[in-house]
Amino acid sequence: MALMTQIRQRSRAIAEDSEDSYFEKLGSNSRTRFLRHVILCAVGAIMLYPLLWMLASSFKPSSEVFADLSLWPSEWDLTNYTEGWNALNHPFHLYLWNSFVVVALTIVGNLASCSLAAYAFARMQFFGKKPLFALMLGTLMLPGHVLLIPQYVIFNLLGWMNTYLPLVVPNFLATNAFFIFLMVQFMRALPSELDDAARIDGCGPFRTFFRVILPLCVPALATTAIFTFISTWNEFFGPLLYLTDSALYTVPLALRQFMDSEGQSAWGPMFAMSVVSLAPIIGFFIAGQKYLIKGIATTGLK
Amino acid sequence: MSTSVAPSATAAPTPAAARGSGAPGRGTPRRRNEKAAYLFLLPWFVGLLFTLIPFGASLYLAFTDYNLINNPNWIGFENFQEMLTDEDLLQALKVTGIYTFVGVPLSLLAALGVALALNKGIKGLRYYRAVYYLPSLLGGSVAIVMLWRYIFGNEGIVNAVLGVFGIDGPSWVSDPQYALSVLISLHVWTFGSPMVIFLAGLRQIPIMYYEAASIDGASRWRQFVSITMPLLSPILFFNLVLALIGSLQTFTQGYILSGGTGGPSGSTLFYNLYLYIEGFQRFDMGYASALAWLLLVIVAMFTAANFLMSRFWVFYDN
């Protein structure tokens, strides 16, 4: 037994290590390796510097922000946050809540509608499957702005201006072909015996989908949820078009208002609220890095 | 791209087997399955209408003078004739073109370079990858564009750094000569997502190719040219197509940096920003639809040219 656990631990250690040591054989001598680390660290530091600087500046008193390169405030000051929170027409938690509502509904819509469509394309036989699948891939390549004006007109006629419906409803209609594609790729890789076994046990297609296939697709669903979260949280154009009432603004629209009233003193609160707006993305990134990296490697999503 | 995703024909259940497990009275299971498949696709079918109808409608509107209030009048090719003498359009094409043809190669080069460096059995790969990838998730956000606007401002930190070396930097954001380069630098900053795709592609190259090559005495450079580049070329092609399509549709960056105007002096007037101004500020929706179709044609032409040229430099291993 002891030997078995030892072997298992060893093999796990190898599996974890293999990512780092894959090309170790070709690795060069220790000096070039050290140099490579130095360069990679320097590039990484330059890339992270603006973010860290913004974080530090959000705690600096406004008089200190300008052209101060340091990443450590001389004194930690929270006034930028309290000021920024109440600087706009509405307190900032309203905008956070609005964004949360839009993001949550968009995620639910994408997961539900795209997984249904993906299941049909990946694991069912029906008349017209090939041309419909090709059509789906075609919409994936279609630049969204071509549809923009008629969609705006339609939403206007439906009386959906100044509601979240134009932002949310299309996601319940599987209009995001990227996620269908991602899930199709994932579902195809599952063994087809699963469906056969479920059918022999008396499952219809719906029960097979909900009880057998969907639980196995959790990684693909997680990838979809995280990508949807990040792109919807950042989304600026849609809200800019459809939301004019400032009580409905999402976080990006609210942030833009700091720019309109741009005086020297507004930078501090603006940075503070920028940090607040980016924090959820960074949190999701840290929590879901595995799914993000996998997802982007299979579909090339941003 | 489409060849790699062609539906694999999973064997349909034979009629005999299907009949054996059929429920009585509701048609054959095969039939039931077909119906079920259409039910699964129902949301997608409705969504398809939301795509196809606007697609056709925008082509129609491109030949009208629609302005959201009055009914559209058919004006033939007038919108397209107007384009020929539209200097703002020329500027928008110029800005988007420079942004694309400078920004995309720079960011792909950075992505490839860092991916190659990270693929040499480096310790702490996942931390490096995380640090380089994070910016690409943030690059499209309003907060980051506003940060860039500040960093490259007259009294921003770029000029503070230059000041240390005694250089008196220009006011990047408000100088028409430099404003676009601020956004190109932001584009390069987000090289992390193509980098992750490159890394995944580099992993697919069997290590024995390199072993065989080094036994044969091939130099590092020779290995790169003869092994890495050919086997990575499909990935490079994929990244190039994606980056071109994405870059031609840039909007938020130009809008935020210029406060929605595309200024200073039209130096950040991206194509989609111009389309937005025509359609939703001047409400010339007919002209904006024509602009949208012109961009569609441009994107399609670039993509087609990419696919045509790919025959000469993309290597497929099968």
Image (spheres, coloured by chain):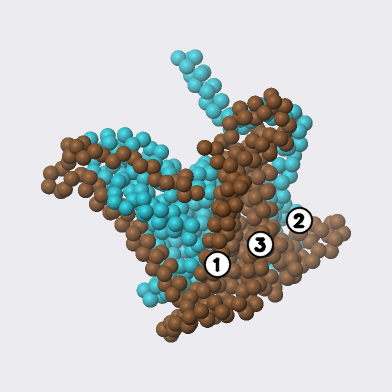
Chain colours: A cyan, B brown
Q: Nearer the viewer, residue B234 or B270?
A: B234
- Marked residue chain, label 2: A
Residue type of the residue flagged with mark 3: Tyr
Residue positioned 75% across, 59% down in the render = B157
Q: Which residue is mark 1?
A: B295
Picture coordinates of residue A241, whole percent (x, y): 49, 71
**Residue carrying label 3:** B99
Q: Viewer-proximal residue, A234 or B47?
A: B47
In the displayed structure image, the side of residue B119 where residue B60 appears, left or right: left
Cα–Cα gap, marks 1 and 2:
42 Å
| Front position in the image: A108 or A220 | A220
**Label 2 sits on residue:** A69
The residue sitting at 75% across, 39% down in the picture is A38
Position in image of residue B143 (x %, y %) = 61, 61
Type of the residue with mark 2: Leu
How far apart are the alpha carbons under marks 1 and 3?
15 Å
Given contact means CB atoms under 8 Å apart, are the residues at marks 2 and 3 in contact? Answer: no
Which is in the foreground here, disc 1 or disc 2?
1
